[in-house]
């Protein structure tokens, strides 16, 4: 037999029209993974990059050492934020389809990632999300009207009409502006964390990026800095299996997990069931405590599934089975937390239906208010002079001149 | 002659060049766009704008290569593959992403031939999307052809219509130097007559899209469409406007521009790149340096302001050079006299 080199092209497990196949996914039973002390040596806990931290079992009970033992109130709050995120997404998607907003990105199926992650942190911790962590904004108290006005690019848009819809920020909520380009927030989060360490502050920085984005150099360089300087930072890789049309194999996920990138750089790394609210909360709590204690950074892979399209610009039916999300072995994060609360006797179908109704009413009221500040076609208009502000701290003479020229054109 | 869109012309050229030369391979994010359906009912998406649709099915996934999301590796690997004699066509989803792979262009491919004592050839084509108008905001809408044209060692192409896109892309792929091929997002749907057969349009040869003798407009990429519209409108008033589309920002067909300016004595330059250190400044400088005595009026530059591209439709439409601005500039140059 002659042996020769050949190009390996990753192939996803199922094409459109085929039966979904998630046999590639390595899943540990709930409660099976040990929880080390927060100051464990990174080298001694490398197995955590390969196993899967899970708390909720098949009967919806919380089991094992990672159970964060949260109160029913906190669990209900988590359920509320996840449900709100999903309903908000549904409504905004509809608004995009109606032509009211130009572009939208849903987080359907992966709400626990941002909601549980953010709820496990202190309010002073700085967040550097990607464009699929809208749940973090809701948890940190951004008003839906403010988020909607950004989507509408209207007179109340926090970005003053300049940024792509979904690129929110929150000054009060300590959330950095979202970049439309990928993985750029990772080195920024590490730098913020290094500064926190320099200032001996108790705050940590937390960032999220998709598994597809881990291919960018920024990811690797950020992980290296986080490790070298033991920066108080949590670097989350949201492995939702799909980067637009390319499955996670194209980001290098065929052989080893994304969490497994961490130990190579000397970083503590956890692989976590991203659809298990309790597991995400517990892993984030562990990593935050480790960072605050000066032990260093943690890389967390959150294994989840992007149930919706990448954005309103692509059609998943072209590249994967349309019903693939229904076969996802880790289920749906909202349904799982809901079932857990019901098993605890702390929730019911009736309360869930009422909550849904209440949140939908809130969203509709917020939308009504948001559109009153202008839409793409109706209502108050944005002052187009805004394009000249904030390029520099002070408006330089050349921009003043260009602004005046445009004003003249208008009149 | 068949009428084809800019998008169709590009797809057709890629197909023809790949059939013609096995060394041509494509690399980029989502360019296959999935595998399509096993039943054959679903076709793979073929990129975010569908430009590479159908090519993986014909040429296989070894020649139409979906990549990880890493522009530095896509462009860097294209350079490495080119050194072996392949003719890679790398796709950069948006020209703004040049930020993360610029070193492979600026310090590597542009200088390979020079640094290797002339003993290597770098036949890389980087296809990329430029331009505003889609509400894509400051990080996905830039026009950086002028900035790239300032780099010695690479060629920069800015086709303004489907016919040119086909002939220029074939030339780019067959060229032995690195070429950055800037497709304007807003032109994909624009159609014109495009022959089915292969043809080449040489680099550095401008296209005179409207002949005239009172004022010269030099415009790049989508701005050529706007210039043509203004020329047609003014022609009805008896104003004779010549429109020149250089087609390549580098090399630049200076002779055609100078010849026209010598004839008309009046020059308006329209570019979607910025007002500083870009193609508009370059053309204005050319006229000032080499056709000064022919100029009857100051050169007018119509560009966006020196700001990032805003996302909101209202702001973006004011940001982009408009028909009204161009018309005003043409009238202003006609009424001015040095």
Image (tube, helix red, strand yellow):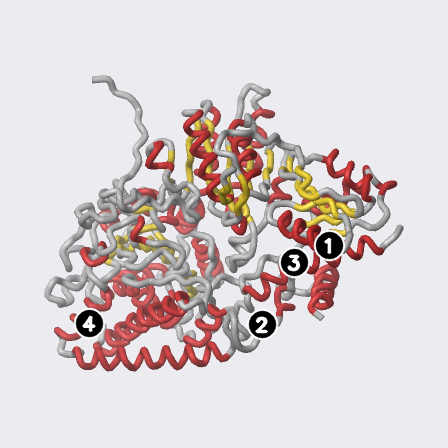
- Binning the other alpha carbons within 10 Å of mark 2 as few (below 14), some (14 to 19) or many (20 upward) gives many
Marks 2 and 3, how far apart at CA = 19 Å
Residue A285 image offset from top left, x and y in percent: 29, 64
Q: Chain of mark 2?
A: A
In the rendered image, which quarter is residue B28 located in? Answer: top left
Q: Nearer the viewer, mark 3 or mark 1?
A: 1
The image shows residue B41 at horizontal and vertical percentages of 26, 46
Pinpoint residue A406: horizontal percent, then vertical percent.
Answer: 70, 64
Q: Nearer the observer, disc 4 or disc 2?
A: 2
| Marks 2 and 1 share the same chain | no
**CA gap, disc 4 and disc 3:** 54 Å
Left or right of A316, for residue A217 = right
Which part of the image, by quadrant, shows the C terminus of chain A?
bottom right
Q: CA distance from mark 2 to mark 1?
A: 36 Å
Name the N-terminal-most of marks 3 and 1: 1
Rendering coords of residue B227 (x, y %): 67, 50
Q: Quadrant of residue A67?
A: bottom left
- SS class of the residue under badge 4? helix
Asked if marks 1 and 4 fall on the same chain, the answer is no
Label 3: element kind: loop
For disc 2, the marked residue is: A382
* Circles 3 and 1 on the same subunit: yes
In this view, B308 is above or below B114: below
Of A368 and A279, nearer the camera is: A368
As drawn, the label of residue B236 is: 1
How busy is the neighbourhood of tag 1: few (under 14 within 10 Å), some, or many (20 plus)? few
Label 1 secondary element: loop
- Measure the C-alpha gap from mark 3 to mark 1: 19 Å
Q: Tell me whether circle 4 and circle 3 mark residues in contact (CB < 8 Å).
A: no
Q: Which residue is mark 3?
A: B322
């Amino acid at each position: 037999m002659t042996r020769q080199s050949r190009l390996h092209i990753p192939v996803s497990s199922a094409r459109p029209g085929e039966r979904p196949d998630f046999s590639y996914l390595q899943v540990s039973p709930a409660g099976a993974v040990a929880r080390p002390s927060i100051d464990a040596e990174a080298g001694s806990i490398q197995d955590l990059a390969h196993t899967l931290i899970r708390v909720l079992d098949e009967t919806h009970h919380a089991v094992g050492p990672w159970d964060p033992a949260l109160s029913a109130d906190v669990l209900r709050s988590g359920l509320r934020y996840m449900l709100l995120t999903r309903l908000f997404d549904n409504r905004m998607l509809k608004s995009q389809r109606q032509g009211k907003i130009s572009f939208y990105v849903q987080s359907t199926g992966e709400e626990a990632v941002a909601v549980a992650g953010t709820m496990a942190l202190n309010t002073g911790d700085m967040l550097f999300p990607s464009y699929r962590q809208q749940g973090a904004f809701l948890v940190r108290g951004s008003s839906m009207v403010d988020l909607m006005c950004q989507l509408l690019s209207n007179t109340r848009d926090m970005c003053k009409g300049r940024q792509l819809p979904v690129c929110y920020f929150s000054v009060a909520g300590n959330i950095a502006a979202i970049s439309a380009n990928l993985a750029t927030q990772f080195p920024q989060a590490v730098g913020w964390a290094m500064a926190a360490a320099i200032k001996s502050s108790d705050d940590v920085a937390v960032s999220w990026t998709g598994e597809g984005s881990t291919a960018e150099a920024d990811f690797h360089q950020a992980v290296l800095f986080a490790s070298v300087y033991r920066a108080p930072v949590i670097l989350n890789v949201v492995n939702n299996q799909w980067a637009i049309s390319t499955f996670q194999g194209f980001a290098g996920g065929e052989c080893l997990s994304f969490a497994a990138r961490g130990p190579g750089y000397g970083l503590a790394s956890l692989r976590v069931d991203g659809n298990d609210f309790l597991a995400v909360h517990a892993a984030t709590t562990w990593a935050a405590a480790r960072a605050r204690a000066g032990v260093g950074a943690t890389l967390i892979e959150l294994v989840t599934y992007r149930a919706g399209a990448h954005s309103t610009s692509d059609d998943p039916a072209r590249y994967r089975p349309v019903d693939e999300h229904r076969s996802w072995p880790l289920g749906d994060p909202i349904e799982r937390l809901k079932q857990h609360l019901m098993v605890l006797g702390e929730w019911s179908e009736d309360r869930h239906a009422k909550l849904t109704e209440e949140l939908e009413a809130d969203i509709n009221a917020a939308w009504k208010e948001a559109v009153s500040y202008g839409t793409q076609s109706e209502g108050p208009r944005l002052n187009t002079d805004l394009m000249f502000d904030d390029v520099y701290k002070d408006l330089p003479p050349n921009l003043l001149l260009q602004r005046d020229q445009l004003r003249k054109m208008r009149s | 002659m068949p009428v084809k869109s800019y998008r169709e012309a590009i797809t057709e050229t890629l197909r023809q060049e790949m059939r013609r030369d096995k060394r041509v391979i494509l690399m980029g994010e989502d360019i296959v766009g999935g595998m399509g359906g096993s039943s054959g009912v679903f076709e793979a998406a073929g990129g975010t704008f569908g430009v590479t649709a159908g090519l993986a099915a014909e040429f296989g996934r070894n020649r139409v290569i979906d990549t990880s999301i890493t522009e530095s590796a896509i462009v860097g690997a294209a350079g490495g593959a080119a050194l072996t004699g392949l003719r890679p066509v790398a796709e950069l989803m948006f020209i703004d992403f040049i930020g993360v792979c610029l070193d492979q262009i600026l310090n590597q491919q542009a200088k390979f031939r020079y640094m290797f004592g002339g003993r290597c050839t770098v036949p890389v084509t980087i296809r990329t999307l430029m331009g505003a108008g889609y509400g894509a905001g400051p990080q996905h809408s830039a026009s950086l052809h002028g900035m790239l044209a300032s780099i010695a060692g690479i060629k920069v192409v800015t086709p303004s219509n489907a016919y040119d896109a086909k002939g220029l892309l074939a030339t780019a792929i067959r060229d032995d130097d690195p070429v950055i091929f800037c497709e304007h997002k807003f032109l994909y749907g624009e159609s014109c007559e495009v022959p089915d057969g292969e043809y080449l349009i040489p680099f550095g040869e401008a296209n005179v899209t409207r002949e005239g003798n009172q004022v010269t407009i030099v415009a790049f990429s989508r701005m050529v469409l706007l210039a043509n519209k203004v020329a047609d409108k003014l022609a009805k008033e008896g104003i004779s406007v010549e429109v020149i589309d250089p087609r390549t920002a580098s090399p630049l067909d200076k002779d055609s521009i100078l010849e026209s300016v010598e004839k008309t004595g009046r020059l308006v330059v329209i570019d979607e790149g910025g007002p500083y250190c870009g193609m508009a400044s370059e053309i204005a400088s050319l006229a000032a340096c080499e056709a000064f005595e022919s100029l009857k009026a100051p050169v007018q530059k119509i560009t966006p302001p020196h700001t990032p591209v805003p996302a909101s439709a209202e702001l973006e439409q004011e940001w982009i050079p408009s028909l009204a601005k161009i018309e005003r500039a043409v009238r202003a140059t006609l009424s001015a006299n040095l």
